[in-house]
Image (cartoon, rainbow, N blue to C red):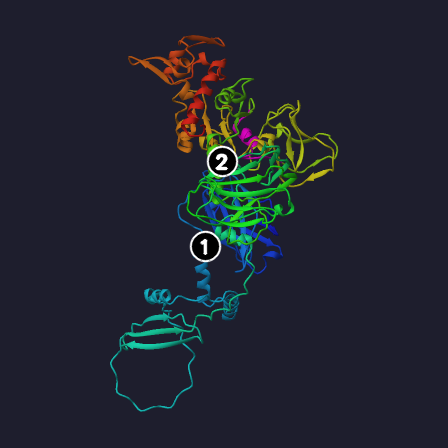
């Protein structure tokens, strides 16, 4: 077999071999794991995942066979993910995930399920025990250890009795093996020959009470010899009630848990953050405290609450302000009363705390600071607090929002996020996307109000665009990044391009000013990637540092992959005009799916090619629609969509949206008639500047159409 070696150090899982894994292989790959000490004594399971397929395999002596279902692929380059977990009954440890590339292999479809489920694997282990392939001593030792670590909980009698009654037949064990022959007994007298007896039908039932005491079981046999019935009555299985624990001190947070927030005085004070009333300056601080300063030239008031009808429900409360005790002689008080200010409580330097009762829900309440004429306060900071009277602790606590306030706040954030949930749109493509200073993407940004991150590079094929995006990332190996800012060669065009993780070749057209790629990151070193005139790609680190030797495949992470792959972004993919390495549309679909899998966000659309006729694009467009549904938007179908009058083609969407009349145009020595092109499903040359690229007006039409389509998909508000 071909061995794939993996090492697990702590929770880090790494691959330690370079063996090839080909698609559609069956039962030829052995996965062998080496674990660090943290995994000792644990049962281990390997998890293999490829898109929606997930298989768990129990490790036997730290090895397992790679499930063939994972490798089944229609002659495509693919990848699967591998991780392991281990458990010992007390704790569970998991590993990181390793991605393993699957290279294209002969297509050999199969439909039968080869890999047993986890349940079937466990039952197979049990079968080994029943066949005597595991020693009884090991079984006894394992069961004893488990029971000591997991003592039985008290059992509910009726539930267990019902279970035994329902599953009586299942609880009968199989017939045991014949025991060893005992010693010969004395010969007894010959008895009369009896009739052949019928095989007895045994049934059983059980009851369990919830009494405490010494565990016991009373077995009663009823029925007949041919159909005996056994009743097991278990008693004393319930453990004795434990002694009550020592009472602890009731904290403010325990009271809050029962009664609500400690401080019921929310900081939305009626008189606001600052005011001057009769020569006293009142300032509300961030923690809800209030600083008072000045000498009152008349009765001075600061309203904390005024006619608040939804503040306090009926009940008994405590009004307190510990700082009042330090203000003797200042003629200051804090008062609470009803709407007509029938006073409920008043606290002062001599009495900084008092209880009061709210007689009914919805009572209009007013709470204020009051300073008599001539009263003087010198930057005195008060921390008034209203709490439930059941809480006798006068220690001040800032107001804590109630569950309802927090829920309303979260719902408000959600509503605001729904109105504008995205920050930007990242557009991946070739020259049809970047297309000079103004593109369809520019128009889409104008309409949506979102920032456009244009990741189009002219001349690139689909596998290169995917490599820049990170769906199948470019890699380097066996190079040394020097300590200085000296360029190092990382690939060459005469070698087919730069290798990718899944075995493709990428041919990025990268100059030093290609900002959607640069700066790139290799082995956590930032630098610039450049295609030289001699057809070599180089990497130059930005800042000098230590020399780094790369002797393992290492990703080249572009700027747009690192910075514009966000949960708050939308992705648009428009690629394939420059080919995709094969004529198989399924390969192109797979590339799109790899990019979508790599994208962190939720919303995306896939744009269809605008070149070609309706006939030669039919299979391509049908396959893309089947794979991506409404998220696939065909540029060709929209721009060339015919408009009829009296069953005659008179124009198409692309011309009509610009107010253009169909005509003829000459390009490169050939004359093209718009109506003839529309009849074939071809985008008219009137909409193009050459055979492929769009006019300025056509870019606006495409941007307008995409904005409308993305609204209809509920992607844009």
Based on the picture, tell me whether residue 483 belongs to the magenta stretch. Answer: no
Q: Looking at this view, is 375 or 390 the one in front? A: 375
Question: Does any portion of residue 333 appear in the rendered image?
Answer: yes
Residue wearing tag 1: 118
Question: Does any portion of residue 29 appear in the rendered image?
Answer: no
Q: Looking at this view, is 338 or 139 the one in front? A: 338
Q: How crowded is the residue under tag 1: few (<14 C-alpha within 10 Å), some, or many (20+)? A: some
Q: CA distance from mark 2 to mark 1?
A: 43 Å
Q: How many marks?
A: 2
Residue wearing tag 2: 413
How far across and how far down the image is residue 37, in percent? 62, 57
Is 435 left, or right, of 618 in this rendering? right
Based on the displayed image, in which of its 4 quarters is residue 544 positioned?
top right
How far across and how far down the image is residue 274, in percent? 59, 33
Image height of 551 relative to 247, above or below: above
Q: Looking at this view, is 328 or 512 the one in front? A: 328
The quarter of the image holding the C terminus is top left
How far across and how far down the image is residue 442, in percent? 52, 20
The disc, 2 or 1, on the residue closer to the chain's N-terminal end is: 1
SS assignment at label 2:
helix
Based on the picture, tell me whether residue 472 belongs to the magenta stretch. Answer: yes
Q: Looking at this view, is 385 or 529 the one in front? A: 385
**2 or 1: mark nearer the eye:** 2
Region rendered in magenta: 460-475
How far across and how far down the image is residue 516, in percent? 59, 27
């Amino acid at each position: 077999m071909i061995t794939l070696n993996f090492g697990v150090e702590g929770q880090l899982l790494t691959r330690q071999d370079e063996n090839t894994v080909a698609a559609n292989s069956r039962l030829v790959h052995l996965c062998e794991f080496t674990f660090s000490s943290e995994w000792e004594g644990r049962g281990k399971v390997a998890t293999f995942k490829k898109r929606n397929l997930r298989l768990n395999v129990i490790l036997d002596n730290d090895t397992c066979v790679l499930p063939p279902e994972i490798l089944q692929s229609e002659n495509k380059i693919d990848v699967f993910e591998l991780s392991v977990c281990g458990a010992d009954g007390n704790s569970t440890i998991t590993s990181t995930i390793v991605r393993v590339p699957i290279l294209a292999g002969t297509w050999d479809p199969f439909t039968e399920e080869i890999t047993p489920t986890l349940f079937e694997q466990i039952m197979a282990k049990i079968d080994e025990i029943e066949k005597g392939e595991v020693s009884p001593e090991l079984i006894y030792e394992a069961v004893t250890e488990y029971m000591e670590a997991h003592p039985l909980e008290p059992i509910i009698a009726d539930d267990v009795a019902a279970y035994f009654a329902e599953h009586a037949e299942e609880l009968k064990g199989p017939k045991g093996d014949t025991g060893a022959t005992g010693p010969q007994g004395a010969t007894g007298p010959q008895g009369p020959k009896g009739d052949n007896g019928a095989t007895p039908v045994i049934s059983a039932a059980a009851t369990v009470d919830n009494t405490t005491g010494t565990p016991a079981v009373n077995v009663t046999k009823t029925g007949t010899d041919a159909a005996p019935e056994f009743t097991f009555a278990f008693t004393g299985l319930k453990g004795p009630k434990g002694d009550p624990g020592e009472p602890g001190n009731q904290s403010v947070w325990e009271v809050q848990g029962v009664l609500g927030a400690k401080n019921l005085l929310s900081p939305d004070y009626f008189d606001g953050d600052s005011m001057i009333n009769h020569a006293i300056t009142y300032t509300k601080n961030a923690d809800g405290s209030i600083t008072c300063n000045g000498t009152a030239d008349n009765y001075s008031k600061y309203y904390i609450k005024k006619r608040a009808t939804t503040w306090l429900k009926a009940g008994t409360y405590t009004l307190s302000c510990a700082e009042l005790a330090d203000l003797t002689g200042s003629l200051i008080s804090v008062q609470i009363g009803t709407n007509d200010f029938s006073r409920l409580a008043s606290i002062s330097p001599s009495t900084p705390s008092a209880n009061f009762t709210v007689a009914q829900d919805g009572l209009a309440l007013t709470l204020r600071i009051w300073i008599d004429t001539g009263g003087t306060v010198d930057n005195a900071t008060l921390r008034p607090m209203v709490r439930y009277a059941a809480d006798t602790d006068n220690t001040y606590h800032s107001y804590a929002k109630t569950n309802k306030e927090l829920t309303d706040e979260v719902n408000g954030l959600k509503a605001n996020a729904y109105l504008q949930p995205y920050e930007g749109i990242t557009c991946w493509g070739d020259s049809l996307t970047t297309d000079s200073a103004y593109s369809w993407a520019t128009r889409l940004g104008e309409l949506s109000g979102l920032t456009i991150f244009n990741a189009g590079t002219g001349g690139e094929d689909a596998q290169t665009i995917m490599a820049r995006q990170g769906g199948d990332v470019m890699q380097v190996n066996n190079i040394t990044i020097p300590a200085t800012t000296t360029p190092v060669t990382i690939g060459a065009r005469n070698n087919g391009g730069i290798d990718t993780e899944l075995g493709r070749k990428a041919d990025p057209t990268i100059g030093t000013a290609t900002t959607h790629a640069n700066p790139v990151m290799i082995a956590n070193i930032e630098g610039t990637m450049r295609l030289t005139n001699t057809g070599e790609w180089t990497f130059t680190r930005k800042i000098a540092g230590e020399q780094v030797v790369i002797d393992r495949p290492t990703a080249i992470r572009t700027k747009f992959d690192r910075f514009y792959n966000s949960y708050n972004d939308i992705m648009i993919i428009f690629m394939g005009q420059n080919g995709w390495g094969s004529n198989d549309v399924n390969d192109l679909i797979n590339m799109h799916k790899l990019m979508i899998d790599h994208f962190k966000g939720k919303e995306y659309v896939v744009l269809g090619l605008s070149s070609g006729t309706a006939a030669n694009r039919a299979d391509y467009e049908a396959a893309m629609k089947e794979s991506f549904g409404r998220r696939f938007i065909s540029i060709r179908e929209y721009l060339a969509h015919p408009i009829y009058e009296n069953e005659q083609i008179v124009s198409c969407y692309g011309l009509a949206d610009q107010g253009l009349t169909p005509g003829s145009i000459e390009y490169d020595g050939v004359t093209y008639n718009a109506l003839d092109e529309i009849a074939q499903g071809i985008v008219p040359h009137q909409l193009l500047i050459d055979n492929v690229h769009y006019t300025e007006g056509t870019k606006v039409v495409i941007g307008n159409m995409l904005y409308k389509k993305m609204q209809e998909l509920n992607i844009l508000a």
